Image (tube, grey):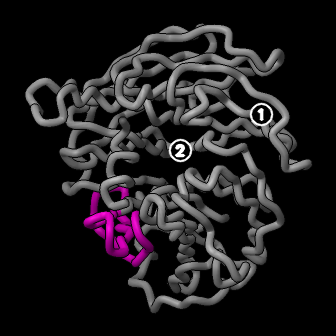
Amino acid sequence: MSRRIVFSVIAALILPGCVQDPVSVKPVVPVPSAKGVYVVNEGTFGRGNATLTFYDLGSFQVYNDVFASVNGRNLGDVGNQIVIRGPCGYIVVNNSDKIEVLDLQTNKSTGTISVGSGRSPRQLAFVNDSLGLVTALYDASVLVVNLRAMAVVGRIPVGENPEGIVVAQGRAYVANSGFGSGRTISVVDLSSMTSVKTITVGDNPSGVALSQEGLVYVVCGGSYGDYSNPADDTPARIVVVNPGTDAVVDSIIIGGHASAMALSADGWGYVPTTDGVVTIDTRTNRLVGSFVKGQYYGVGVEGVSGDVYLTDPKDYVQPGEIAVYAPNGQLRTRFPGGVIPGSIAFKR
């Protein structure tokens, strides 16, 4: 079982130096033109209290519970991911078996994509403006979504308990977590929409990211073995796959356990682990070392400044916060989020 699910169940163009302390928290709608940061707060499993936070990078205002404030209803049960394409934001709501489509100018929902009861959607990747692929945790599949019709139009069997997914060179790469027991990624051919092979990577693959050089980085969280015996754990590692050949070209042991990774445009990867946040040089595929201490959960890198946003879920019950660090590891600011802040997306 992934760390993300374990904790959920247990808990039931800004330049360097310009980030300031948040002015206040406002439960109202951000201005339409604002550039900023969206954070999906998962909420407690089974409570239906997922929320959406927006941090305005012009005014440094924090707007919490944006979705409910605008739409007059809750976001749903376990907000797992937010991704942006064009004028829309797509929020994958895991335990509610849906994807909310958000107009980023108004934060109004323009529709809800139902993926089918019990499938448990996890992450969404785009094939093009009309087609998306979403991993279905309990369905051992990738679902094909028509984004214009807002409907699931196909199903592709993959490995057990798929989570992360990226698209590269006409294929999709899917991390088959196996709830901690998986060791493979599935390769889906986008012309035929079929799974054409599996690649062995490492214990518990869950997060995936695509570098500027076009390489696929797979976060293998490591095996927990017997949960009561840390001595039989295996360490987290980053496995690098060349999508041109589907060959594993590197494997980088990072230690601890991990499930997420964010890559910058200038060759750095940031991975929150149970031993702190580590940095990887993606130009050499080498572990650089510790970036900051502390146990963080989600991670994102702002594309212009290179600032690193890390989510802190605290005790997974009370509202968490988001810490913003400069690329040199200096803390810039912190701002409040909701319960279990996780996925991050940048509105530019």
**Residue 201: x, y in percent?**
41, 16
Q: Earlier in the sequence, mark 1 or mark 2?
A: 1
Q: Amino acid at mark 2?
A: Ala
Q: Is residue 271 above or below residue 310?
A: above
Residue annotated with mark 2? 265
Magenta span:
312-340
Which element is circle 1 on? strand
State the residue at coordinates (37%, 60%). 12
Q: Quadrant of the N terminus?
A: top left
State the residue at coordinates (48%, 45%). 264
**Residue 345: x, y in percent?**
58, 58
Would residue 2 appear left or right of 96 to someone viewing this image? Answer: left
Between the residue at mark 1 and the residue at mark 2, the CA separation in whole angstroms equals 29 Å
Q: Amino acid at mark 1?
A: Val
Question: Quick check: can you spot residue 283?
Answer: no
Would residue 268 appear left or right of 148 to someone viewing this image? Answer: left
Would residue 267 appear left or right of 7 to someone viewing this image? Answer: right
Q: Quadrant for residue 279, please give it.
A: top left
Q: Which mark is residue 144?
A: 1
Q: Is residue 174 above or below residue 309?
A: above
Question: Quick check: can you spot residue 80?
Answer: yes
State the residue at coordinates (74%, 15%). 194
